[in-house]
Image (cartoon, rainbow, N blue to C red):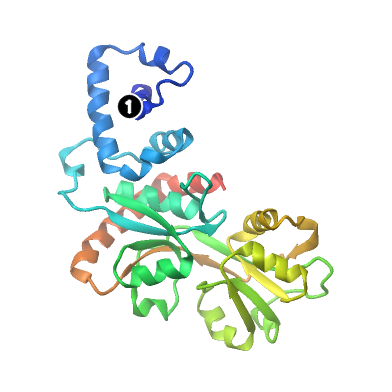
Amino acid sequence: MNKFTLVMIVTGLALSAQAGMRDIAAQYNADQFARGHEQLIHWVQYTPEWTSKPLSHYFDHVMGGDTPEQTSESIVSAAPSVTLFYNSGQKPKAWTNQQGQAQGFAFDVAAAILTQAKIKFIAKGVPFNRGLELTKKCEGLMTGVFKTKERQKSLSYSLPIVPDKAVIITRADSAFEYKEMSDLNDKHIAYLRGAAFGNEFEQAVVKFRVATLQKPATMLKLLLKGRVDVVILNPGRATVEYAAQDAGIGMEHFKVASIPLAQVDNYLVFCNQQPEINQSILQRINTAITTLKQRGRFDQIMADY
């Protein structure tokens, strides 16, 4: 994407009033502005979910080459936008910020995939379990979902997108040392409602005492009070730091096990009740995933988190 097109996108989104932007735009002639205007119209029309994004988001995606190709083949034939569900409260994986905008690597990766696949979408943040149920009812697709045998009964999965570490957290003064799944037997464990950390966990969880909650910060508060023995959070240490910050508790009160509970791939998922519709979408999405992985685009996104 050349510098001029970038300027046109920014100016076209009413951002030209920012300092210095008019001077930059003035460097280009009328023909360049006309061509840029056409590109801008196409870009906004087929990526409507980005129109409320901050400026940094436009720079990231434009410079990453994820805007639609300006060819007739890129125009999706009057198809309605699909709903992309994402977990509204799981930093840094996916969440809704204070401005009501979607953030997180699971969302950013899904946005890049759908844009590359030229599929119009509207993002909707919901509690994880609710999003999964809505997806099973064919009301949209969801990002940031792990694969389990149970879920495969009602969901179709894309190719894997990015991996995700689930980590074990205990109180800093706890003598418990996690080494393998069986160490959790008879422990009182808290984790995100609706979460599943692979088939091994699904088989072992019946031996645990489980509390599932919606907010990681609440889990850490319960852990500190001794109400639970262990908290499982994903993805990785970063999510523990976010949760501790939200709970107003210093990280020195917690211990994150050096051995992760699991490293599990994330997927985009669909209901499997409409194969005649979803098969075509799934094929385009899988092609986009392959293309973006080859470009290193997912690595670029993950580097920000």
In the visual, does 154 lie left or right of 105?
A: left
Quarter holding residue 185: bottom right
Residue 259 in sight here:
no
User: Label 1's element?
Assistant: helix
The residue located at (65%, 66%) in the rendering is 218
Q: Say which quarter of the image contains residue 303.
A: top right
Q: Residue at x 58, y 75 (%)?
A: 212
Q: Which residue is mark 1?
A: 12
Q: Is residue 13 left or right of residue 101?
A: left
Amino acid at the residue labelled 1: Gly
Q: Quadrant of the N terminus?
A: top left
Task: Look at the picture and state if 43 lies above or below 96.
Answer: above
Residue 78 placed where, x, y %?
16, 49
Quadrant of the image occupied by residue 190: bottom right
Q: Residues within 10 Å of mark 1 (few under 14, many from 20)?
A: some
Residue at 48 percent of width and 18 percent of height? 19
> Residue at coordinates 25% horizontally, 30% vertically from top-left?
39
Q: Nearer the viewer, residue 16 or 117?
A: 16
Counting from the top left corner in percent of width and height, residue 119 is at: 27, 51
Q: Position of residue 95 (x, y in %)?
A: 51, 54
Q: Where residue 160 appears, x then y in whole percent?
A: 42, 62
